Amino acid sequence: MKNIDVARIFDEIADILELKDENRFRIRSYRRAARVVRDMPGDVKSLLEAGELTSVQGIGSSLAEKIEEIINTGTCRFCEDLKEDPLYSLTALLSVPGVGARLAVKLKKEAGVASVDDLEQAAREGRIRSIEGIGEKLEEKILKGIEQYRRNVGRFKVSDALAYAEAIVKTLGAIKGVSQIDIAGSLRRMKETIGDIDILVISKSSHEIMDAFTSMGNVTDVLARGETKSSVILGSGIQVDLRILPKSDYGAAMHYFTGSQDHNVAMRDRAKRMGLKISEYGVFDVKGDERRGDEAANRRGGEREEDVFKLVGLPFIPPELRENSGEIEAAEKGTLPKLIEPRHIKGDLHLHTDASDGRNSIAEMAHQGWEMGYKYIGITDHSKSLRIAGGLDEVEFGEHIKAIRAANRKVSGIEILAGIEVDILPDGRLDIADEVLAECDIVIAAIHSRFNMPRDEMTGRIIKGISNANVHVLAHPTGRLINERDPYEVDLEKVMAAAHEHKIALELSAHPDRLDLKDSHCRAAREAGVKVCINTDSHADRQMLNMRFGVATARRGWLEPGDVINTYPLAKLKRFLSRQGR
DNA sequence: CCTCGCAGGAGGGGGGATCGTCGGATCCC
């Protein structure tokens, strides 16, 4: 039982309780616990074994007991009992946008609906329209909601969401009367997956903007169109919310709509203790017992986002840190990290060429690196056991390394390092001979086979692989593909300890399908004193632009430039890579 | 259900925007 399983059970409990119209705070407790467990960096199991569950915010004795039961038995009595309730079948309906608990219960009572399929059929046959309180429009909305539900399970990758959002910002930003337009929400925080896109605008010409927004070419549905808020669905299935705000409230709104929810709650808490109230409209004085905090006379600020922080005595907290995972405490103590930025990156050390499965030549990759302002790049093609990717053997690598050296002599302004992405075989050996590896400037070790090994074996395999004195970096350390493939089973803590011992850097693959290490792992690496190397693993020159997603993930993991080896100047990088330096 | 702060019990984040229908449900960070 893993964190995600515990979280799913808690969410399920919350759904059923909601259908039963239970106490809303009880429901919120389960939802909150689900989120906390889902997002926690370590294993909930080890927290349980350490007896520290109840020290987690939002987990008390009752939830801790249930977690223990779930870890030990795979389920919990309370949840199983709830599933006996006739309302249980309705939980699926809650995932249909526009259908909440009230409506779901009504649909069951009045039309015998017990599943999404039932609902669709009943709606098509016009049977729900006759129910009191439901009309033609709601019927249509429900059918649309079902369509959306079917099309769009799971979330969007940050790279996809960002592409849509930036196009919209460009389109709407060009309209006269738009004086400010920004991306907010989880996309601004650069989470690895995005539920929907939030965009905020300052403007006085509401109609024109809403017209432009709702009539964009890729809009397939307009869910809402108001004076200050509109929502649309794009052809890809992603929802975009647009809000128009007065200049005076913009900063407070940016803070509010950037989230995260947990961060906002903690900020409000803090404000409250200081006799203030933070809302999406600004920061207000709360005087005595009167709870009329919104009056203009009580307003303390909110035009700029910085105001919100300043008024509660804090420095600006970068959006990527706003997860209520210690950033407010760090801000208070003045110990916020000085986060890495794209401009700090001096090179990309994991690149493929047409020698194996890449599309471009060595020179073309170098040119792209030069265009991005890099001082160096590393060419690291696949090794022979990855046949499908045209992996090279020892002889071929001998030639390839010569070709890289030759290319390096021809370019100026950028150093091309010769390297290999070498496979770690199932038994932990590397599939290229040590003599060849020793000729390289950089060796990246990677797992590309036998993903289903038991945890202990996989951990041992990786540790043996990176114990080879020729290895500098461990590629995509958990092997996951976002929304596609779970990470393989591995004890990252042990891997980090080994990486620390052998002075190996762990890769943060910036490829938006991977983002591996992920944010919380980066933070753990930093705390373990393990260096990170942010690479794009590009198979074509343009993919090197994915570096931004790696940097964003590193920022979410609290990394500073000094934690990341490819921020080093070339000489320092070479010292890190040289065996003497290690 | 949890947390706080008191030792049993109170209070909990919360209000606005929108839609569709006629007082209310859903959604949002």
Image (spheres, grey):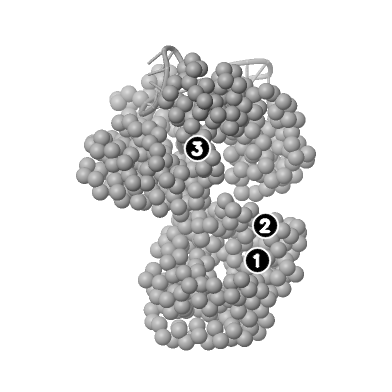
- Helix, strand or loop status at disc 1: loop
Give the residue number, with chain letter if any, for mark 1: A447
* Residue that appears at 61% across and 30% down: A115
Q: Is residue A268 left or right of residue A55?
A: left
Identify the residue under disc 3.
A147
Q: Which is more foreground, mark 1 or mark 3?
A: 3
How packed mark 2 is, by other alpha carbons closer than 10 Å (few <14, some 14-19, many 20 or more), is some
Looking at this rendering, what residue extends furthest in the left direction?
Answer: A176
The residue under the point 32% across, 23% down is A295
Q: Is residue A298 above or below residue A206?
A: above
Asked if badge 1 and badge 2 are on a common chain, one would say: yes
Q: Do tag 2 and tag 3 residues touch (Cβ < 8 Å)? A: no
Give the image location of residue A231, x and y in percent.
39, 36
How crowded pointer 1 is (Cα within 10 Å; few <14, some 14-19, many 20+) is rated as many
The residue tagged 2 is A488
CB within 8 Å, label 1 to label 2 = yes
Q: Secondary structure at mark 2?
A: loop
Which badge, 1 or 2, comes first in the chain's sequence? 1
- Residue A10, image x, y percentages: 65, 34
Q: Amino acid at mark 3?
A: Glu
Quadrant holding the N terminus of chain A:
top right
Q: Is residue A185 visible?
A: no
